[in-house]
Image: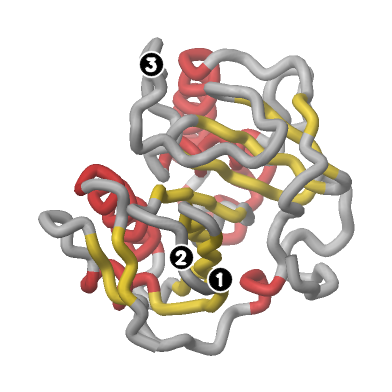
């Protein structure tokens, strides 16, 4: 493969490197699916334990000559990113995990009302973390097991945010990945290119059985609560 990616500027390269670094932090063997078309590169990853897809879109210096769509090692791609020259080398493809064949739809997104602002979302995550720690510390020694901690975590992070269907775990994932930062009046030049019909700057979107929390710094997408099978058991189809 060894295709060369040329980003619009060094900031785009730095943002991509930061995103890949967070994925590798959670999973050293992380893989990402790349889709490039026109003047943008979309990078999809799945950090473990959150049960969401993370999406970062990066502007390219020029439209790609041929569409690019493959799954590669996140670590190898990270190592190839040269922020000074705003370039990266596409590693050879790897056998993708099941989620890599199941991506959110490209279009048909509509805004869902009821999403609190970024500050309120951050406060909700902080309160959930504090509750988990308090309940964990209150467990008797004989009950402080991995299964009991997992049960508490599932109970807390499955709660929905405000009047929406969005689970708190999706907001936690967005914050952990650096997507929930203070939004400036002007969206930064390195902000991900929105999909058709996207509002800005922070919004909850729905398309079919999918939900997507979009910010100027990236998106997290997931199947709506109650859809059988989560991400891993979906029918694999190209998108």
Instruction: Name the image quarter holding residue 79.
Output: bottom left
Residue at mark 3 to residue at mark 2: CA–CA distance: 28 Å
Q: Is residue 172 left or right of residue 104?
A: left
Query: Mark 3–mark 2 contact, CB under 8 Å?
Result: no
Helix, strand or loop at mark 3:
loop
78 to 199, vertically: above or below: below
Q: Quadrant of the N terminus?
A: bottom left
Task: Kindly tell me whether residue 164 is visible in this rendering.
Answer: yes
Please state, as top left, top right, bottom left or bottom right, where the C terminus lies in the image: bottom right
Along the viewing direction, whichever of 120 and 78 lies nearer the viewer: 78
Q: Which residue is mark 2?
A: 64
Q: For the point 37% across and 19% down, which residue is it? A: 182
Mark 1 surroundings: few (<14), some (14-19) or many (≥20) residues within 10 A: few
The answer to the question of whether label 1 and label 2 lie on touching residues, with beta carbons closer than 8 A, is yes
Image-based side of 21 in relation to 159, left or right: left
CA neighbours of label 2 inside 10 A, class few (<14), some (14 to 19), many (20+): some
- Gap in angstroms between the C-alphas marked 1 and 2: 7 Å
Q: Which residue is mark 3?
A: 186
Judged left or right of residue 141, residue 226 is right
Quick one: label 3 or label 2, which is nearer the N terminus? 2
Residue 21: image quadrant is bottom left
Question: In the displayed structure, would residue 228 be above or below residue 181?
Answer: below
Q: Residue at x 48, y 87 (%)?
A: 94
- Pair 3/2: label in front: 2
Q: Spot the residue most to the left.
A: 84
What residue do we see at 41% from left, 50% from top? 58
Q: Secondary structure at mark 2?
A: loop
What residue did someone put label 1 on?
67
**Residue 43 drawn at (x, y percent):** 48, 59
């Amino acid at each position: 493969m060894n295709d060369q990616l040329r980003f619009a500027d060094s900031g785009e390269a730095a943002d991509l490197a930061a995103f890949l670094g967070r994925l590798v932090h959670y999973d050293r063997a992380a893989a990402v699916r790349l889709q490039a078309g026109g003047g943008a590169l979309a990078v999809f990853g799945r950090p473990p334990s959150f049960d969401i897809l993370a999406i970062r879109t990066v502007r390219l210096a020029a439209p790609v000559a041929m569409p690019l769509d493959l799954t590669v090692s996140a670590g190898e791609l990270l190592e190839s990113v040269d922020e000074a020259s705003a370039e990266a080398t596409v590693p050879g493809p790897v056998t993708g995990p099941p989620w890599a064949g199941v991506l959110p739809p490209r279009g048909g997104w509509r805004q869902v009302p009821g999403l609190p602002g970024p500050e309120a979302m951050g406060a909700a995550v902080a309160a959930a973390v504090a509750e988990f720690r308090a309940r964990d510390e209150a467990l008797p020694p004989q009950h402080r097991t991995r299964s009991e901690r997992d049960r508490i975590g599932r109970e807390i992070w499955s709660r929905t945010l405000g009047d929406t269907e969005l689970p708190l775990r999706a907001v936690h994932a967005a914050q952990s990945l650096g997507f929930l930062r203070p939004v400036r009046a002007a969206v930064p030049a390195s902000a991900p290119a929105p999909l058709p019909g996207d509002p800005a700057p922070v919004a909850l979107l729905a398309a079919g059985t999918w939900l997507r929390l979009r910010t100027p710094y990236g998106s997290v997408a997931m199947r709506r609560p109650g859809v059988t099978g989560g991400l891993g058991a979906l029918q694999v189809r190209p998108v």
